[in-house]
Image (cartoon, rainbow, N blue to C red):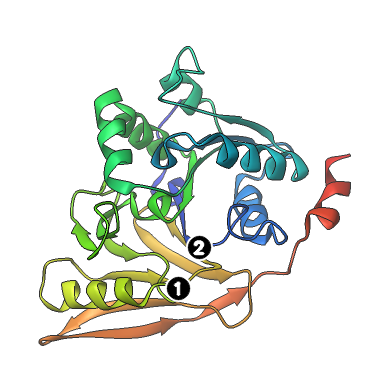
Amino acid sequence: MAEATQDQRTIFAMGGGGFSMEPDNLALDQYILALTKQERPKVCFLPTASGDAEEYIQRFHTSLETLGTEHSHLSLTRYNQPDPHRHLLDQDVIYVGGGNSFQMLLVWRAHGIHETLRQAWEEGIILCGISAGSLCWFSGSITDSWGHPLQVLDDGLGFLPDSHCPHYDGEPERQEIYEESIASGVLPPGVAVEDSCGVLYRGTQFVESVCSVPGKSSYRVTADGQKAQKTPIPTRTLPRLTPEAARPATK
């Protein structure tokens, strides 16, 4: 496939929400699918960060079936796809789940998946995810991969040069350490995203912030001397979408 133009390279990073956190409101997932402009988009779930947890995988399939997609998953512990690289590059969307960010990146790099994901991005396949599946696209973040206290993760895939903090409103410790890391220069300026919220990038340029719950927001976080300064990003609220409301579209 030919390389996409800069504005076709798409990443949607969710601080929290989607089918795994809001099974009764699939608005963020529907937003992702609409980006493909396909009637029945092909979506592959990459649950590496959860250790390929079966229950997580099943929730993905249930929700994405409701939304009328051609859905699959890639397990790197069970080798369920004969050619994982080709399978990923045959998708419209690659959806990365949450879990242990450090282990996920380690496994990806061992299998060469990080290179395939970059190729997918360059070819215009939409990359998205929640939590670990959100922060992986950026240069760095804060992670609980080693338990508490939370620590800086500075070896993200770096497709986006910003830093990133998911769960910005749901985990006060994460917010505090993220802001301290930017103020001290350990992490570059970035975008912090609350639960039920996601940010869209085309190429490496921020496009918009959307949320599935009114009142949620994202923030641009920068260093201001020895302190961090956060600026709210205008955030568009998506219409609520219950599974029941989504089902007729699959017929």
Q: Is residue 139 above or below residue 112?
A: below
**In terms of secondary structure, where does tag 1 sit?**
loop
Residue 40 location, quadrant: top right
Where residue 210 appears, as percent x and y from the top left, is: 56, 69
Q: Is residue 120 left or right of residue 242?
A: left
Instruction: Relative to 92, say whether 37 is above or below.
Output: below
Residue 240 percent location from the top left of the image: 73, 68
Q: Position of residue 89 (x, y in %)?
A: 47, 27
**Which residue is found at the position 70% from the left and 37% from the top?**
69
- Sort mark 2 into few (<14), some (14-19) or many (20+) by Cα contacts within 10 Å: many
Q: Secondary structure at mark 2?
A: strand
Mark drawn on residue 153 = none
**Labelled disc at residue 170:** 1
C-alpha gap between disc 2 and disc 1: 9 Å
Residue ranking furthest to the front: 148
Image disc number at residue 16:
2
Left or right, residue 75 beside residue 153: right
